[in-house]
Image (cartoon, helix red, strand yellow):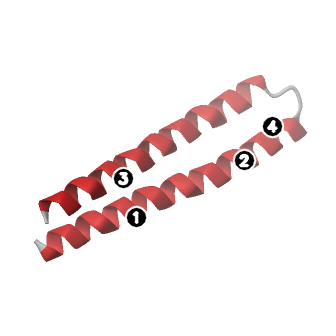
Amino acid sequence: MDWLVAIGAAISLIGIAGLIWCVLMALNARKSAPSEDIMRERLQKVVLLNMGALGVSALGLMIVVTGILLG
């Protein structure tokens, strides 16, 4: 089941990259937003992307654990 562990690790890395991207988007939104309403709107979109990236990372970790338990 080594291939399952490798696939799960790759999916986890994609999720972690998404989390880093969300942090960069949030920092950019804080710096470039002309008003608080626009910043709040941008940060709400970042929160949705952040939750998705966290879910992808958790799914990858579940696949890794499944591969370890089956292997």
Helix, strand or loop at label 2? It is helix
The residue that mark 1 highlights is: 59
Q: Which mark is residue 11?
A: 3
Residue 67, x across and y down, in percent = 20, 68
Q: Is residue 13 left or right of residue 54?
A: left
Residue found at x 13% / y 60%: 2
Residue 64, given in percent of the width and then of the height, sits at 25, 63
- Could you tell which of marks 1 and 4 lies nearer the N-terminus? 4
Horizontal arrangement in the rendering, residue 14 relative to residue 36 (left or right): left
**Which residue is labeled 4 in the image?**
39
Indicate whether 28 appears above or below 52: above
Residue for point 56% across, 56% down? 52
Measured Cα–Cα span from mark 1 to mark 4: 30 Å
Of all residues, the one furthest to the left in this rendering is 71
Quick one: label 4 or label 3, which is nearer the N terminus?
A: 3
Residue in the foreground of this view, choosing between 66 and 20 = 66
